[in-house]
Image (cartoon, helix red, strand yellow):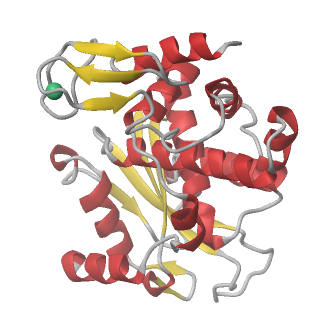
């Protein structure tokens, strides 16, 4: 899309795929106020005014929609994804803006993934990002343990989910069962929980770790595109990988689906992005309390 007008029409169709719906009363008709740079919509029933960007990842942004959709298109690339350094050169924006845009898109992808629990024959196993080549039984400070979940269909993963694990849930190199139980409770559908297959043993046969090749692909992508990712933001990058991979696995049109996700989920501020830890201590203690 080359013009703001095209982008406005495209975003409108993805924000309200079934036609306008007032966020205050649900009414279907609105008057368009076109005196601003972006149109404003006034509900003909309750007079509530809403903008096209309200409730989307672009809310509060001064970057043009053309640049936003260009960024979404580049994130949609199933082979590579994109780093903030490359994006700021392509879009001619500052590194801070490019970094913030990509993280806002990832945040929406993570929320979309978390809202759709794994359903079907689910296999869960452990994995580790950043593991150095040593054979000790102790965890290296730079290693990030991850629980990998996959829906299996015809012996192949048809949907995946990777979740980082708090260090409190590690013992040596072993991920404790609480991590798997917490994963099942939060990310597996109620109907599929009883039949989950869990492979957390350190020496569990590799062939049972059905999503292992995809996790290795994710590690390769993180190391090649971003030269490695620290623990703080690892989960958001894994969310991006899983969301894009899942769309590719179900042969969905990735750009269109990602545009819908960016239109359906609210934004996160730059301040929150730069201050919020990957998993808050409060979140951990809550998980502890409810999982044991
Ligand atoms: Zn209304």
115 up-or-down from 9: above or below: below
Q: Position of residue 228 (x, y in %)?
A: 78, 62
x and y percent of residue 57 in the render?
A: 49, 41
Residue 69 higher or lower than 225, as above or below: above
Residue 25 horizontal side relative to residue 181, left or right: left
Residue 214: tell me if it is visible.
yes
The x, y position of residue 55, in whole percent, is 38, 39
Quarter assignment of residue 132: bottom right
Q: What's the residue at 52%, 29% (across, down)? A: 258
Is 292 displayed left or right of 241 in the figure? left
Q: Residue furthest front?
A: 35
> Residue placed at 65% from the left, 52% from the top?
100
Q: Quadrant of the N terminus?
A: top right
Above or below, comparing residue 62 to residue 259 in the picture: below
Q: Is residue 70 positioned above or below 57 on the image?
A: above
Quadrant of the image where one finds ligand 1: top left
Tell me: 88 left or right of 124.
right
Judge from the rendering whether residue 84 lies leftward or rightward of residue 66; answer left or right: right
Count numbered badges in the picture: 0
The foreground one among 204 and 91 is 91
Q: Quadrant of the C terminus?
A: bottom left
Residue 155 appears anywhere in the view: no
Residue 141 or residue 264, whichever sits in front: 264
Residue pictured at 45% horizontal, 86% vertical: 168
**Residue 21, image x, y percentages:** 23, 21
Task: Give the residue displayed 51% in from the left and 83% down from the top.
Answer: 167
């Amino acid at each position: 899309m080359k013009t703001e007008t095209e982008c406005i029409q495209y975003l409108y169709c993805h924000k309200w795929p079934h036609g306008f719906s007032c966020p205050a009363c649900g009414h279907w008709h609105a008057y368009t106020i076109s005196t601003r740079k972006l149109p404003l919509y006034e509900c003909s029933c309750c007079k509530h005014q809403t903008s096209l960007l309200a409730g989307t990842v672009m809310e509060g942004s001064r970057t043009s929609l053309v640049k936003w959709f260009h960024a979404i298109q580049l994130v949609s690339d199933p082979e590579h994804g994109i780093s903030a350094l490359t994006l700021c050169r392509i879009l001619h924006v500052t590194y801070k803006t490019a970094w913030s845009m990509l993280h806002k898109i990832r945040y929406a992808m993570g929320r979309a993934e978390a809202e759709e629990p794994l359903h079907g024959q689910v296999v869960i196993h452990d994995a580790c990002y950043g593991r150095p080549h040593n054979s000790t039984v102790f965890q290296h400070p730079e290693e990030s343990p991850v629980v990998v979940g996959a829906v299996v269909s015809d012996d192949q993963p048809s949907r995946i989910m990777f979740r980082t694990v708090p260090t409190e849930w590690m013992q040596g190199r072993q991920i404790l069962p609480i991590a798997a139980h917490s994963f099942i409770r939060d990310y597996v559908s109620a109907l599929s929980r009883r039949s989950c297959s869990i492979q957390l043993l350190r020496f569990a046969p590799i062939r049972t770790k059905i999503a292992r090749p995809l996790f290795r692909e994710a590690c390769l992508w993180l190391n090649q595109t971003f030269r490695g990712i620290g623990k703080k933001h690892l989960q958001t990058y894994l969310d991006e990988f899983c969301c894009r991979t899942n769309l590719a696995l179900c042969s969905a049109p990735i750009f269109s689906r990602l545009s819908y996700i960016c239109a359906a989920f609210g934004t996160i501020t730059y301040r929150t992005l730069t201050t919020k830890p990957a998993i808050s201590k409060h979140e951990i203690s809550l998980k502890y309390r409810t999982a044991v």
